[in-house]
Image (cartoon, rainbow, N blue to C red):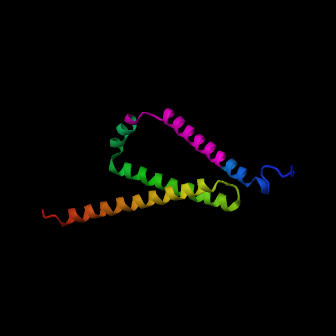
Amino acid sequence: MSGIGPLGGAGGGSLHQIMAMRQQILDRSQLLQEVHTASTAPAPSAAVEQAPTDGFGGALKHALDGVSASQNRAEALSAGFERGEVTDMAQVMLARQEAGIAFEATLQVRNRLLSAYQDIMRMGV
């Protein structure tokens, strides 16, 4: 026996196994958290009933607040990663991608609203 541990140079394959097991644990933990939040979340019908009382402006504000929160979370995770406080690069990249997609969706909604406004303004009375 050479005395090199499982994480040493001779055991490079075991490092990959450990990283794969770590990823599986993280994936399962994420799934459990999603199941837990889904089971404790209020019924969707209650959220649907609340939306009409706020009106279009309230729904739009709520959506923009969600995008802003997503961007703030991504920024905080990125800053934490740069400082060395967050070590999970996948979590940082996922948050950044989520914020980017939310921003792109917001731009698409804005473009559609602007197009609809322009169509209405072109209508004859």
Q: Quadrant of the C terminus?
A: bottom left
Q: Closer to the camera, 44 or 94?
A: 94
Asked whether, in this view, residue 117 is left or right of residue 47, the answer is left
The extreme front residue here reads 1
Q: Residue at x 64, y 48 (%)?
A: 20
Q: Residue at x 64, y 53 (%)?
A: 88
Residue 89 on image: x %, y %: 63, 57
Residue found at the very far left of the displayed protein:
125
The magenta region covers 20-45
Give yes or no for residue 18 being in the magenta stretch.
no
Tell me residue 72's x, y (percent). 55, 57
Examine the residues drawn in magenta and state their main secondary structure: helix
Residue 43 lies, with reference to residue 66, above or below; the image says above
Q: Position of residue 27 (x, y in %)?
A: 58, 44
Q: Look at 66% across and 59% down and name the residue there.
A: 81
Relative image position of residue 84 (x, y in whole percent): 71, 58
| Lateral position of residue 45 relative to residue 83, left or right | left
Residue at 60% across, 55% down: 90
The image quadrant that residue 48 belongs to is top left
- In the image, residue 42 sits, relative to residue 95, either above or below, namely above
Nearer-the-camera pick, 99 or 97: 97
Q: Is residue 82 left or right of residue 108?
A: right
Nearest the eye: 28 or 92: 28
